[in-house]
Each structure stands twice: as C-alpha cells, then as structure tokens.
Amino acid sequence: MNPESLARPLRVLRVCLHLLVAVLLAVAAVRALAGQGPQRAAVLAASVLLAVVYAAGAALPLVRRSRGAAAAWLAVLTAGWLVLLVLTSDGVWFAFPLFLLHLFLLPTRWGTLAVAATTVVAVVGVAAHQGTLTPGAVIGPGIGAAVAVGTVLGYQALYRESERRQRLIEQLTATRAELATAEHAAGVLAERERLAREIHDTLAQGLSSIQLLLRAAQRALPDQLDVAAGHVEQARRTAQDNLAEARRFVRALTPPGLDGGSLPAALRRLCAATADRSGLAVRLHLDGTAVRLPTGHEVALLRIAQSALANTVHHAGASRADVTLRYRDSGVVLDVVDDGAGFDVDDAGRPGGDGGFGLAAMRARAEELGGALAVESAPGRGTTLAVSFAFPGTGASGAGA
C-alpha cells in the first residue's frame, strides 16, 4: 500500500466527519426547538454558527495547507463549541469531531494535549448540566477521545509505513536501473573484447599474411612471374578466407573451418594452409579418441591454434611447428610447439607489443570457458603453448606438452 492508495480512505473519513458534524449539530438544534427551555434560540443560533464556521474552514484550502490557519480555525471552532456546551449538554457530542480535527490538523504532541483538554472540558460540562459527576459523564468523552486518538495515530503510522515502503520501492527501482546500466556497459565491454580477439586471431593475422605474400610477389617480379603469381594466388585465397570470417563475425556464426566438420579436420586444414602460405613445416598430431566438444570450446581451440601459429610464422623465425590435440577422459589439451627463437615469457605482456596482446587474448578466451593456458619459452629455446579444457561434469585437466 502506498500513500496514494491511502488518499481514498482519507477522503472517505473526511466525508464521514462532515456528515457527523452536520448530524450532531442538527440533533442539538432539533432538540432545542422541541424543548420548552428559555435558551432554545441561543442553542439554535450557536448550532448554526458552529455549522457556518465549520463549513468555512472545511471549504478553505488555506486551512489544509497552513498550520497557523488551521490552529486559528480550530480556536474559533472550539470557542463556538464551548458556547454550545454551556447552553446545552447535547453539545458534548461535538467533542468527538473536535478530537479528530485536533489530531489531524495539529502536530501530534499538541493535538494530543488538545484532545486531553477537550475531554476534561466535556466531562466538566456534562457534570455541570447534570449537577453531579457520574461515571457516564467520564466514560463517554473518555472513550470518544481514546477512539479518536487510536484511529488517527493508527492512520498516521500506516501512512508513515507506506511512505517508507514507497521510498524503498523507488530506491529499488533506481538500483535496478543502475544495475541494468552497469550490465549493459559490461556487455558492451565484453563484446568489444570478443571482437578484438576475433579480429586479432583472424583478420589481423590474415592481413599480415597477405602483406608478406604481396611483398614476396613484389620481390619475385619481373624475373619470376610464376613465383609471383603463386604468392598473389595465396594472398587472394587468404583474403577470401578473411572475408568469410568477417561475414561470420557479423552473423555471430562459427568459424568457416568448423562448418560441417570436426575440430581435428579444421586443425588439419589450418596446418596445411599455414604451411602452404609460409613454407613452415607444420604437422598435426592426434592423441586419443576424438569426441564432439561444445561449439564454444571448439571455436576457442581453433582460434587459439590460429593465433599461436600466426605468432610462430611472424615472430618466431621457426623451421617447424607441431600441433597436438590430446583427448583424455578428463578433458582435452591442445599443444603448439615450435623450434623458433623463443622469447621471455615475463616480458610478453609489455604494453605496445602485438605478441603480448595475442597471448592475453588467448588466455582470456580460454579462461572465459573455464580453461587454462600455459606458455613455456626462453630466448633461443623455442616456444610451447598449451591450452586445456575440462569436459562438462569433470574436474579441471592439467595442461601437458
């Protein structure tokens, strides 16, 4: 329940209060007219005056907006009630609407004191008219005051609780909006990182190969036209493959090498294409019984192999490279080993080094799927790269060379 939902009961209570005031004043006026006392005219005049004062205050918005105006109106209304109470004992019943008005329009402490004072005055007024203080003269106003205090304080407590809940809902809504914004930003960053890895592992490496092939073709011209034509043809095929990769980035599909085939077949084609373009002796070794892995794992293994072989071709100065795919009961391991110049692993992540980004991208790709990547290398001793994934439902597998 929110504060808006409490507004309707408050409007109903206000209407009931207006009706109660009208009925009580009408009863006092009718009883005065029906009686034979000398104060009939005075009671009727006091009742009419009270009705006018009450209607004026209820109709003025200033009374509801300003506590000063409300206090002044209550003072006039209370004074009129005192006159009516002096004239007739029927005026005691008007004390109940006064209780509610004091509690609603005045601060809680002052409203409660006003209710207590009004109760005392009502008891004294009834006792004065009866000539004696009876239990009924005390119990009636007392019960009326207790009911009024309980009703108003209960409503105020409920209203405060509703306001607190409304604030909590607003805070929760704001927090959810902030969380959605943060998740969106995280998704954008993750997608950027994914595209950066894909571009580095495929398009960037392919463009680098095309550049090397065109340079080789340029050196072969014009004396070795056949050799130059072969380099240009290889460059054309590489560009065609990269175009297919780029189209699959846009469509978020699997790499062309995995379309309709297995991971070992894709790795075999990768090794053959790398050897054909670079002249490097690249061999694929299979160990264990091949099984179908989740698509994400096969894509990651193929991309890591592409990036590792590209690093070997462009940076290692190696004469051979061996790619080994091992299927184990607990997982799968991919090794890429070359006999190149090697490098200092601790310095591989220096800013500005393309090789450093490639290793970081491979490691991030493996870790996203719960895998592990290990690199062993030293200057003049070649490089061994191993990436391992555990099969679903098993423990982590260790990386082996």
Image: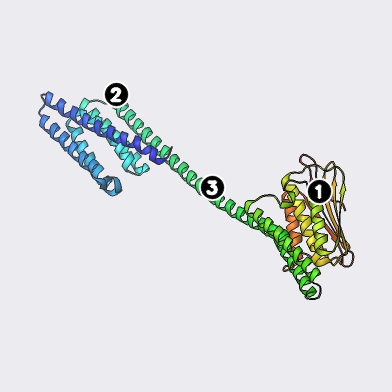
Q: Amino acid at mark 1?
A: Pro
**Residue closest to the eye, 41 or 237:** 237
Number of numbered discs present? Answer: 3
Dot 2 or dot 3, earlier in sequence: 2
Residue at the spot 29% in from the left edge and 38% down from the top edge: 101
Residue at the spot 77% in from the left edge and 71% down from the top edge: 217
Picture quarter containing residue 82? top left
On the image, numbered disc 2 is attached to which residue? 136
On the image, numbered disc 1 is attached to which residue? 264
Name, please, the residue furthest toward the bottom: 222
Q: Is 88 positioned to the left or the right of 170 in the image?
A: left
Q: CA distance from mark 2 to mark 3?
A: 59 Å
316 over 329 or under it: above or below: below
Check contact, mark 1 vs mark 3: CB within 8 A: no
Q: Tag 1, which secondary structure?
A: helix
45 over 283 or under it: above or below: above
Q: Amino acid at mark 3?
A: Arg
* Callout 2 crowding tier (Cα within 10 Å): few <14, some 14–19, many ≥20: few
Residue at the spot 75% in from the left edge and 61% down from the top edge: 358
The quadrant of the picture occupied by the N terminus is top left
Q: Is 175 positioned to the left or the right of 335 in the image?
A: left
**Residue closest to the eye, 137 or 327:** 327
Q: Is residue 193 visible?
A: no
Dot 1 or dot 3, earlier in sequence: 3
Q: Amino acid at mark 2?
A: Gly
Picture quarter containing residue 148? top left
* Callout 3 crowding tier (Cα within 10 Å): few <14, some 14–19, many ≥20: few
Q: Tag 2, which secondary structure?
A: helix
Residue 176: mark in rendering: 3
Q: Give x and y (percent) for residue 172.
A: 52, 45
Check contact, mark 2 vs mark 3: CB within 8 A: no
